[in-house]
């Protein structure tokens, strides 16, 4: 009888310990999980007012330097019609955000989800306070963009000026390109294929827009514009290919005498090589730039290479210079 | 932004009907290397050192992926020349030694000669003991003869220098790079003639440098030619015109050494003429240039 009672008491103790340890382990897991998810971390709230709430949702991650530091807590439409978004941020990151910090929407990678990104602000100024309202930026300004793409900063200005000078050169009514163009129009008069002439005419119209080029590049939203232009270019490449093939078939020897007018395209080819290199430096860094744009840049490079081997600019002219082109000029210092 | 589209349309027009299919399958890494190197050379010609450095570094990676010793040697050589041109002799020497080592290991005659003479020229310019090659014959590319000529000139082996410059001038290629080498050869011959007090030949060579620089656009060489022309000219008005034209180019190119040399000569002219106000103004400018040179040296040391 006594043995049976001891057995029962022992079993009760074991069950008790089992239950206590189980509950303890569960609580520990909950504690660790909540600590990792910052449930108990001290929070603070800051606000910003975008023109529209379209890109936001409650719970949307808020990032700083790629780290999640909070989330969008509340989205309100205020009485006066303004959107106000409240961000709940972890307090230990507050000292990293300074007055002048701005919020903006950005994509994680090319096809990632949209997140709110907060910048550091002016590090010489004090940290943001609970309840502060941040500025909102729809897209990176040119300055911000240049600061973000550090490896390409030194190139960006040169790139813009080179493109601008190219545009000027191309738009010169007495310039080689214009002359070449009129030459093409002349020789294509006798060539079958209305579509070919239409293409050349469209090309002429497009050239007249070049004057706006430099201004557009210098305005903000340069990344967006770059992206759109490259997309547009991709589409044009697809459209143009059948025309160019037709020209190759039908134009033949008739177009050959345009060669002389196109000789200066060498200059264009050189400049474009540099520009394409700069773009390929920029591309991986630019937010939201579509993948096909990179493919397009590669197409430009291959086109430039084709240019040198094309019958249109004089057969395989330039092939012989390949070797000397690829060897750096010696540093002789011929100063008197 | 339709501008890019326009450029592509032009290229498409030009590229249409591209001649013949290539029968050979090419190594894409080798192609990439050549493409990057060509772009790097263009960037270097425009004195965009950072862009050129990145392109040459990527070209080296592509050459290594292509596993082609000839391309690897060329990539190291390009990097070496870039560093020397940008004023970093230490990095330049290291890269040229790598180029030479790869070329010699794989018995690449042209690459080996190119890196050896370039290394010798660098050492000679630094006042260190350097290799003294004999006349190379005419089988090498123009740039190698040009380096050998300059090396001979600095080593005061004037006959070797003259013969090598002549070889460069006899090259029949008409691409931009060869044209530039020819202008440099004329400039070298002008300096050689001036060193040997043959002012008539020097003047003729300088005139050729000026003319050819105008044709293909080589402003730094044009400025050097103007500076040398001023030295050779007797007439003061012509001398001043040449110096002012050279100074304008050096200013645009931000060539501090060139500005300093030119300002010294202009000051000398002003002093001879008794123009004290002009001389003081030039001295002020010279001081500013001197300070800028000191600053740039400090930055170089910090780097």
Image (cartoon, rainbow, N blue to C red):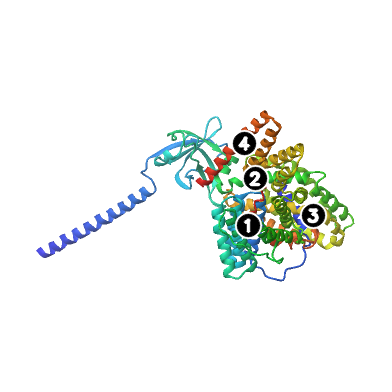
* Res A263 label: 3
- Front position in the image: B294 or B45: B294
The image quarter in which residue B240 lies:
top right
Q: CA distance from mark 1 to mark 2?
A: 40 Å
Residue B152: give x, y in percent of width and height. 65, 58
The kind of secondary structure element at disc 3 is loop
The kind of secondary structure element at disc 4 is helix
What residue did someone put label 4 on?
A: B286
| Residue drawn at the location 65% of the way across and 61% of the way down | B34
What residue did someone put label 1 on?
A: B155
Mark closer to the observer (4, 3):
4
Please tell me whether residue B53 is drawn above or below residue B230 in the rendered image.
Answer: below
* Res A158 label: 2
Residue A161: give x, y in percent of width and height. 68, 43
Structural crowding at the residue carrying mark 4, measured as other residues with C-alpha within 10 Å and reported as few (<14), some (14–19) or many (≥20): many
Identify the subunit bearing mark 1.
Answer: B
């Amino acid at each position: 009888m006594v043995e049976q009672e001891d057995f029962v008491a022992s079993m009760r103790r074991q069950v008790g310990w089992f239950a206590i340890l189980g509950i303890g382990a569960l609580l520990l897991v909950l504690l660790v999980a909540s600590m990792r998810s910052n449930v108990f971390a001290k929070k603070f709230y800051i606000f910003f007012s975008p023109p529209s709430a379209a890109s936001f949702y409650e719970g949307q991650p808020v990032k700083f330097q790629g780290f999640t530091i909070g989330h969008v807590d509340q989205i309100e439409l205020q009485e006066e019609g303004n959107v106000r978004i409240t961000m709940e941020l972890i307090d230990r990151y507050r000292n990293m955000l300074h007055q002048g910090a701005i919020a903006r929407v950005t994509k994680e990678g090319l096809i990632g989800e949209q997140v709110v990104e907060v910048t550091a602000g002016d590090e010489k100024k004090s940290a943001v306070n609970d309840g502060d309202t941040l500025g909102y930026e729809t897209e990176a300004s040119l300055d911000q963009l240049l600061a973000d793409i550090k490896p390409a900063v030194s190139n960006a200005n040169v790139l813009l000026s080179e493109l601008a000078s190219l545009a000027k050169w191309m738009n010169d009514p007495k310039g080689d390109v214009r002359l070449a163009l009129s030459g093409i129009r002349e020789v294509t008069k006798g060539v079958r294929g209305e579509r070919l002439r239409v293409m050349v005419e469209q090309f002429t119209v497009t050239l007249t827009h070049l004057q706006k080029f430099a201004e557009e590049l210098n305005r903000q939203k340069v990344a967006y514009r770059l992206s759109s232009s490259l997309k547009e270019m991709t589409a044009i490449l697809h459209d143009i290919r059948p025309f160019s093939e037709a020209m190759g078939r039908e134009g033949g020897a008739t177009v050959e005498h345009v060669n002389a007018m196109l000789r200066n395209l060498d200059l264009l080819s050189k400049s474009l090589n540099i520009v394409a290199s700069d773009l390929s430096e920029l591309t991986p860094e630019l937010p939201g730039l579509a993948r096909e744009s990179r493919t397009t840049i590669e197409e430009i490079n291959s086109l430039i290479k084709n240019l040198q081997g094309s019958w249109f600019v004089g057969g395989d002219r330039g092939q012989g210079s390949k070797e000397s082109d690829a060897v750096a000029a010696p540093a002789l210092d011929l100063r008197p | 932004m339709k501008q890019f589209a326009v450029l592509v349309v032009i290229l498409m027009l030009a590229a249409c009907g591209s001649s013949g299919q290539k029968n050979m399958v090419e190594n894409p890494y080798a192609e990439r290397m050549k493409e990057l190197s060509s772009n790097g050379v263009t960037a270097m010609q425009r004195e965009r050192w950072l862009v050129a450095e990145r392109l040459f570094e990527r070209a080296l990676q592509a050459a290594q992926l292509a596993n082609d010793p000839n391309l690897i040697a060329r990539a190291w050589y390009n990097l070496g020349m870039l560093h020397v041109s940008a004023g970093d002799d230490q990095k330049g020497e290291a890269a040229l030694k790598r180029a030479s080592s790869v070329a010699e290991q794989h018995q690449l005659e042209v690459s080996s000669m190119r890196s050896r003479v370039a290394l010798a020229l660098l050492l000679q310019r630094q006042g260190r003991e350097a290799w003294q090659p004999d006349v190379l014959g005419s089988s090498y590319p123009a740039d190698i003869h040009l380096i050998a000529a300059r090396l001979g000139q600095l080593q005061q082996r004037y006959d070797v220098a003259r013969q090598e410059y002549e070889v460069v001038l006899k090259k029949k290629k008409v691409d931009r790079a060869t044209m530039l080498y020819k202008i440099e050869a004329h400039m070298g011959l002008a300096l050689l003639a001036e060193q040997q007090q043959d002012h008539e030949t020097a003047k003729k060579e300088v005139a050729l440098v000026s003319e050819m620089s105008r044709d293909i656009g080589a402003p730094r060489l044009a400025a050097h030619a103007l500076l040398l022309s001023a030295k050779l000219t007797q007439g003061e008005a012509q001398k001043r015109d040449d110096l002012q034209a050279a100074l304008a180019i050096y200013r645009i190119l931000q060539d501090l050494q060139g500005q300093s040399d030119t300002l010294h000569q202009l000051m000398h002219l002003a002093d001879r003429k008794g123009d004290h106000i002009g001389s003081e103004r030039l001295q002020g400018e010279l001081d500013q240039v001197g300070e800028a040179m000191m600053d740039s040296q400090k930055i170089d040391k910090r780097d």
